[in-house]
Amino acid sequence: MPSHRRRYPYAVRRVAAELTPVPHLQRAPYSGAVERLALTTADGITIAATLLRRGRDRLAIVCHGFATTQRTASIVWLAEQLAGPMDVLTFDWRGYGASTGHASFGGAEALDLAAVLSSARELGYARVGVVAESMGGLIALATLGAESGSEGFPMPDALAAVSAPADYALTAGLRPQLVKYVAPVSWLRPVAPLLGFRLGEVQLPRPLDVVGQISIPLLLIHGDRDGTVPVRNAYLLHEHNPAATLRIYPGVDHAIAGMRARSPRVFLDDLRQLLEHMDGKAPPPASTLATPDLPGAAQND
Protein backbone atom coordinates (compact mmCIF):
# COMPACT_ATOMS: atom_id res chain seq x y z
CA MET A 1 0.00 0.00 0.00
CA PRO A 2 1.45 3.45 -0.92
CA SER A 3 2.78 5.36 2.07
CA HIS A 4 0.43 8.33 1.62
CA ARG A 5 -2.52 5.99 2.04
CA ARG A 6 -1.13 4.80 5.34
CA ARG A 7 -0.55 8.36 6.54
CA TYR A 8 -3.86 9.87 5.49
CA PRO A 9 -7.17 8.16 6.29
CA TYR A 10 -9.86 7.77 3.68
CA ALA A 11 -11.99 10.66 5.00
CA VAL A 12 -9.11 13.13 4.73
CA ARG A 13 -8.27 12.10 1.17
CA ARG A 14 -11.92 12.23 0.16
CA VAL A 15 -12.38 15.73 1.56
CA ALA A 16 -9.16 16.87 -0.11
CA ALA A 17 -10.44 15.62 -3.47
CA GLU A 18 -13.82 17.29 -2.99
CA LEU A 19 -12.14 20.61 -2.15
CA THR A 20 -9.76 20.54 -5.13
CA PRO A 21 -11.33 23.04 -7.54
CA VAL A 22 -9.83 21.63 -10.75
CA PRO A 23 -11.62 18.34 -11.67
CA HIS A 24 -8.71 16.67 -13.45
CA LEU A 25 -6.47 17.24 -10.41
CA GLN A 26 -8.86 15.52 -8.02
CA ARG A 27 -7.72 12.11 -6.81
CA ALA A 28 -10.82 10.84 -5.06
CA PRO A 29 -10.27 7.54 -3.23
CA TYR A 30 -12.68 4.61 -3.18
CA SER A 31 -14.14 3.54 0.14
CA GLY A 32 -13.89 -0.17 -0.69
CA ALA A 33 -11.74 -2.61 -2.61
CA VAL A 34 -11.20 -2.04 -6.33
CA GLU A 35 -9.26 -3.79 -9.07
CA ARG A 36 -6.96 -1.87 -11.39
CA LEU A 37 -7.06 -3.04 -15.01
CA ALA A 38 -4.97 -2.19 -18.06
CA LEU A 39 -6.89 -2.62 -21.33
CA THR A 40 -5.40 -2.44 -24.81
CA THR A 41 -7.11 -0.82 -27.79
CA ALA A 42 -6.90 -2.00 -31.40
CA ASP A 43 -4.28 0.69 -32.10
CA GLY A 44 -2.13 -0.22 -29.09
CA ILE A 45 -3.21 2.40 -26.56
CA THR A 46 -3.30 1.32 -22.90
CA ILE A 47 -6.54 2.29 -21.15
CA ALA A 48 -6.36 2.49 -17.35
CA ALA A 49 -9.55 1.17 -15.78
CA THR A 50 -10.94 0.50 -12.31
CA LEU A 51 -13.37 -2.33 -11.54
CA LEU A 52 -15.67 -2.32 -8.54
CA ARG A 53 -16.39 -6.03 -8.44
CA ARG A 54 -19.42 -6.95 -6.35
CA GLY A 55 -20.10 -10.42 -7.72
CA ARG A 56 -22.93 -9.37 -10.04
CA ASP A 57 -23.62 -10.44 -13.61
CA ARG A 58 -24.40 -6.87 -14.70
CA LEU A 59 -21.88 -4.09 -15.26
CA ALA A 60 -22.24 -0.33 -15.46
CA ILE A 61 -19.44 1.44 -17.33
CA VAL A 62 -19.01 5.08 -16.33
CA CYS A 63 -17.34 7.34 -18.94
CA HIS A 64 -15.91 10.67 -17.79
CA GLY A 65 -16.15 13.92 -19.71
CA PHE A 66 -13.89 16.69 -20.98
CA ALA A 67 -11.03 17.78 -18.69
CA THR A 68 -11.87 15.23 -15.98
CA THR A 69 -10.67 11.69 -15.21
CA GLN A 70 -11.95 8.50 -13.62
CA ARG A 71 -10.56 9.84 -10.30
CA THR A 72 -12.64 13.03 -10.43
CA ALA A 73 -14.83 13.18 -7.31
CA SER A 74 -18.14 13.10 -9.20
CA ILE A 75 -17.12 9.99 -11.16
CA VAL A 76 -16.01 8.13 -8.03
CA TRP A 77 -19.23 9.20 -6.28
CA LEU A 78 -21.40 7.83 -9.09
CA ALA A 79 -19.45 4.56 -9.33
CA GLU A 80 -19.89 3.92 -5.62
CA GLN A 81 -23.57 4.84 -5.69
CA LEU A 82 -24.25 2.36 -8.51
CA ALA A 83 -22.08 -0.45 -7.14
CA GLY A 84 -23.87 -3.18 -5.24
CA PRO A 85 -26.84 -4.20 -7.38
CA MET A 86 -24.28 -4.28 -10.20
CA ASP A 87 -20.54 -4.15 -10.73
CA VAL A 88 -19.08 -0.87 -12.00
CA LEU A 89 -16.12 -0.03 -14.22
CA THR A 90 -14.56 3.39 -14.74
CA PHE A 91 -11.67 4.28 -17.03
CA ASP A 92 -9.59 7.13 -18.47
CA TRP A 93 -10.03 8.01 -22.14
CA ARG A 94 -6.82 8.06 -24.18
CA GLY A 95 -4.70 11.10 -23.35
CA TYR A 96 -6.34 11.42 -19.93
CA GLY A 97 -5.25 10.36 -16.46
CA ALA A 98 -3.27 7.12 -16.38
CA SER A 99 -4.11 6.06 -19.96
CA THR A 100 -1.55 6.44 -22.72
CA GLY A 101 -1.98 8.10 -26.11
CA HIS A 102 -3.44 11.46 -27.10
CA ALA A 103 -7.00 12.76 -27.05
CA SER A 104 -8.72 13.54 -30.34
CA PHE A 105 -11.90 15.18 -28.98
CA GLY A 106 -13.93 12.09 -29.76
CA GLY A 107 -12.92 10.30 -32.96
CA ALA A 108 -10.10 7.92 -32.01
CA GLU A 109 -11.78 7.37 -28.65
CA ALA A 110 -14.23 5.02 -30.40
CA LEU A 111 -11.43 2.45 -30.13
CA ASP A 112 -11.25 3.04 -26.38
CA LEU A 113 -14.96 2.39 -25.98
CA ALA A 114 -14.69 -0.76 -28.09
CA ALA A 115 -11.83 -2.06 -25.93
CA VAL A 116 -13.73 -1.39 -22.69
CA LEU A 117 -16.90 -3.05 -23.98
CA SER A 118 -14.97 -6.05 -25.28
CA SER A 119 -13.25 -6.47 -21.92
CA ALA A 120 -16.62 -6.31 -20.15
CA ARG A 121 -17.89 -9.22 -22.22
CA GLU A 122 -14.65 -11.14 -21.73
CA LEU A 123 -15.06 -10.71 -17.98
CA GLY A 124 -18.33 -12.58 -18.31
CA TYR A 125 -20.94 -9.88 -17.76
CA ALA A 126 -24.32 -10.87 -19.16
CA ARG A 127 -25.63 -7.30 -19.31
CA VAL A 128 -23.56 -4.16 -19.82
CA GLY A 129 -24.80 -0.59 -19.58
CA VAL A 130 -22.93 2.63 -20.30
CA VAL A 131 -23.31 5.93 -18.43
CA ALA A 132 -21.40 8.65 -20.28
CA GLU A 133 -21.18 12.33 -19.37
CA SER A 134 -20.50 15.34 -21.60
CA MET A 135 -17.63 14.51 -24.00
CA GLY A 136 -17.94 10.88 -22.97
CA GLY A 137 -21.60 11.05 -23.97
CA LEU A 138 -20.68 12.53 -27.33
CA ILE A 139 -18.20 9.69 -27.93
CA ALA A 140 -20.68 7.02 -26.87
CA LEU A 141 -23.56 8.41 -28.93
CA ALA A 142 -21.42 8.89 -32.04
CA THR A 143 -19.72 5.50 -31.74
CA LEU A 144 -22.80 3.42 -30.95
CA GLY A 145 -24.82 5.22 -33.61
CA ALA A 146 -22.17 4.63 -36.26
CA GLU A 147 -21.64 0.99 -35.21
CA SER A 148 -25.31 0.09 -34.79
CA GLY A 149 -25.97 -3.08 -36.75
CA SER A 150 -22.27 -3.89 -37.06
CA GLU A 151 -21.59 -7.54 -36.27
CA GLY A 152 -18.05 -6.91 -35.10
CA PHE A 153 -18.74 -4.19 -32.52
CA PRO A 154 -19.40 -5.17 -28.87
CA MET A 155 -22.60 -3.19 -28.33
CA PRO A 156 -23.83 -2.54 -24.77
CA ASP A 157 -27.37 -3.32 -23.65
CA ALA A 158 -28.29 0.25 -22.65
CA LEU A 159 -26.87 3.78 -22.77
CA ALA A 160 -27.44 6.82 -20.56
CA ALA A 161 -25.99 10.02 -22.05
CA VAL A 162 -25.64 12.79 -19.46
CA SER A 163 -25.29 16.39 -20.69
CA ALA A 164 -24.07 15.11 -24.05
CA PRO A 165 -23.44 17.46 -26.98
CA ALA A 166 -25.37 16.83 -30.17
CA ASP A 167 -22.59 18.70 -31.97
CA TYR A 168 -19.46 20.47 -30.69
CA ALA A 169 -20.69 23.58 -32.51
CA LEU A 170 -23.61 23.70 -30.07
CA THR A 171 -21.47 23.79 -26.93
CA ALA A 172 -20.71 26.96 -24.99
CA GLY A 173 -17.91 28.56 -23.00
CA LEU A 174 -14.29 27.51 -23.50
CA ARG A 175 -14.89 24.30 -25.40
CA PRO A 176 -15.87 25.59 -28.88
CA GLN A 177 -13.07 28.17 -28.81
CA LEU A 178 -10.54 25.50 -27.87
CA VAL A 179 -11.75 23.18 -30.60
CA LYS A 180 -11.92 25.89 -33.24
CA TYR A 181 -8.79 27.90 -32.57
CA VAL A 182 -6.36 25.97 -30.36
CA ALA A 183 -6.70 22.26 -31.09
CA PRO A 184 -5.92 22.44 -34.84
CA VAL A 185 -2.64 24.32 -34.19
CA SER A 186 -0.01 21.65 -33.51
CA TRP A 187 2.47 23.94 -31.74
CA LEU A 188 -0.20 24.95 -29.22
CA ARG A 189 -1.00 21.36 -28.22
CA PRO A 190 1.61 21.27 -25.42
CA VAL A 191 -0.67 23.59 -23.40
CA ALA A 192 -3.45 20.96 -23.35
CA PRO A 193 -2.12 19.21 -20.18
CA LEU A 194 -3.00 22.38 -18.29
CA LEU A 195 -6.62 21.44 -19.03
CA GLY A 196 -6.10 17.83 -18.01
CA PHE A 197 -5.28 15.92 -21.19
CA ARG A 198 -2.66 15.33 -23.88
CA LEU A 199 -3.99 16.42 -27.25
CA GLY A 200 -3.30 14.82 -30.62
CA GLU A 201 -4.96 15.20 -34.01
CA VAL A 202 -8.52 16.47 -33.69
CA GLN A 203 -11.24 14.11 -34.97
CA LEU A 204 -14.67 15.54 -34.23
CA PRO A 205 -17.68 13.20 -34.41
CA ARG A 206 -21.24 14.55 -34.69
CA PRO A 207 -23.76 12.47 -32.72
CA LEU A 208 -26.71 14.24 -34.32
CA ASP A 209 -25.94 12.49 -37.62
CA VAL A 210 -26.17 8.95 -36.21
CA VAL A 211 -28.13 9.03 -32.93
CA GLY A 212 -31.26 7.92 -34.79
CA GLN A 213 -29.58 4.60 -35.56
CA ILE A 214 -29.18 3.66 -31.87
CA SER A 215 -31.70 0.91 -31.15
CA ILE A 216 -30.69 -0.12 -27.63
CA PRO A 217 -32.52 1.55 -24.69
CA LEU A 218 -31.29 5.15 -24.66
CA LEU A 219 -31.74 7.61 -21.80
CA LEU A 220 -30.92 11.28 -22.41
CA ILE A 221 -30.42 13.29 -19.20
CA HIS A 222 -29.80 17.04 -19.19
CA GLY A 223 -30.07 20.03 -16.88
CA ASP A 224 -31.99 23.05 -18.08
CA ARG A 225 -29.35 25.38 -16.57
CA ASP A 226 -26.43 23.75 -18.37
CA GLY A 227 -24.04 26.54 -19.34
CA THR A 228 -21.51 24.24 -21.05
CA VAL A 229 -23.74 22.09 -23.25
CA PRO A 230 -27.04 23.99 -23.52
CA VAL A 231 -30.22 21.95 -23.08
CA ARG A 232 -31.05 22.47 -26.75
CA ASN A 233 -28.61 19.63 -27.44
CA ALA A 234 -30.80 17.15 -25.56
CA TYR A 235 -33.94 18.21 -27.40
CA LEU A 236 -32.19 17.86 -30.77
CA LEU A 237 -30.89 14.38 -29.89
CA HIS A 238 -34.37 13.32 -28.82
CA GLU A 239 -35.88 14.79 -31.98
CA HIS A 240 -33.54 12.58 -34.02
CA ASN A 241 -34.25 9.52 -31.85
CA PRO A 242 -37.83 9.82 -30.51
CA ALA A 243 -37.64 6.31 -29.05
CA ALA A 244 -35.16 7.56 -26.46
CA THR A 245 -36.30 8.58 -22.98
CA LEU A 246 -35.63 12.27 -22.33
CA ARG A 247 -35.23 13.63 -18.82
CA ILE A 248 -34.74 17.36 -18.24
CA TYR A 249 -33.84 18.39 -14.67
CA PRO A 250 -34.95 21.89 -13.61
CA GLY A 251 -32.26 24.11 -12.13
CA VAL A 252 -29.42 21.66 -12.84
CA ASP A 253 -26.10 22.57 -14.45
CA HIS A 254 -23.62 20.44 -16.39
CA ALA A 255 -22.70 16.74 -16.23
CA ILE A 256 -22.57 14.37 -13.27
CA ALA A 257 -21.25 17.09 -10.96
CA GLY A 258 -24.30 19.22 -11.72
CA MET A 259 -26.69 16.30 -11.21
CA ARG A 260 -25.02 15.40 -7.92
CA ALA A 261 -25.20 18.98 -6.64
CA ARG A 262 -28.88 19.65 -7.33
CA SER A 263 -30.80 16.47 -8.09
CA PRO A 264 -28.88 13.36 -6.98
CA ARG A 265 -31.81 11.17 -5.93
CA VAL A 266 -33.78 11.65 -9.14
CA PHE A 267 -30.59 11.20 -11.17
CA LEU A 268 -29.66 7.94 -9.45
CA ASP A 269 -33.23 6.64 -9.65
CA ASP A 270 -33.33 7.27 -13.40
CA LEU A 271 -29.99 5.53 -13.95
CA ARG A 272 -30.90 2.54 -11.79
CA GLN A 273 -34.21 2.14 -13.58
CA LEU A 274 -32.31 1.83 -16.84
CA LEU A 275 -29.35 -0.24 -15.62
CA GLU A 276 -31.10 -2.67 -13.28
CA HIS A 277 -33.62 -3.66 -15.93
CA MET A 278 -31.45 -4.21 -18.98
CA ASP A 279 -33.52 -6.80 -20.78
CA GLY A 280 -33.42 -5.60 -24.35
CA LYS A 281 -36.59 -3.57 -23.97
CA ALA A 282 -36.93 0.18 -23.72
CA PRO A 283 -37.30 1.58 -20.19
CA PRO A 284 -40.79 2.61 -19.05
CA PRO A 285 -41.86 6.00 -20.42
CA ALA A 286 -40.70 8.93 -18.31
CA SER A 287 -41.94 12.48 -18.29
CA THR A 288 -39.71 14.97 -20.07
CA LEU A 289 -39.48 17.23 -17.03
CA ALA A 290 -38.00 15.60 -13.92
CA THR A 291 -39.13 16.48 -10.42
CA PRO A 292 -36.31 18.33 -8.65
CA ASP A 293 -34.92 17.09 -5.34
CA LEU A 294 -35.68 18.94 -2.14
CA PRO A 295 -33.03 21.38 -0.85
CA GLY A 296 -30.13 19.56 0.75
CA ALA A 297 -30.75 16.33 -1.15
CA ALA A 298 -27.20 16.34 -2.49
CA GLN A 299 -25.89 15.22 0.89
CA ASN A 300 -26.47 11.52 0.27
CA ASP A 301 -22.91 10.16 -0.09
Image: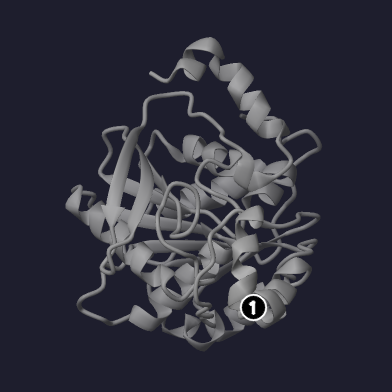
Element at badge 1? helix
Which color scheme is applied?
A: one colour
- Disc 1 crowd, CA 10 A, few/some/many (<14, 14-19, 20+): many
Residue extending furthest toward the front: 187
Seen in the image, is 147 located left or right of residue 20?
A: left
Q: Which residue is mark 1?
A: 168
Give the left or right position of residue 53, taking residue 164 as reference.
left
Residue 193: x and y in percent read 60, 56
Which quadrant does the N terminus fall into?
Answer: top left
Residue 263 visible in the shown view: yes
Asked if residue 266 shows in the view, the reply is no
In screen coordinates, is 63 left or right of 174?
A: left
Amino acid at the residue labelled 1: Tyr
Rendered view: 61 above or below 66: above
Q: Which residue lies at the image location 51% right of the left edge and 81% below the top edge? A: 205
Along the viewing direction, whichever of 132 and 44 lies nearer the viewer: 44
Residue under the image location 31 percent in, 66 percent down: 114
Q: Position of residue 172 (x, y in %)?
A: 76, 71
Q: Position of residue 251 (x, y in %)?
A: 81, 55
Residue 113 is drawn in which quadrant? bottom left
- Residue at x-position 43% and y-position 60%: 94
> In this picture, is 173 found above or below 271?
below
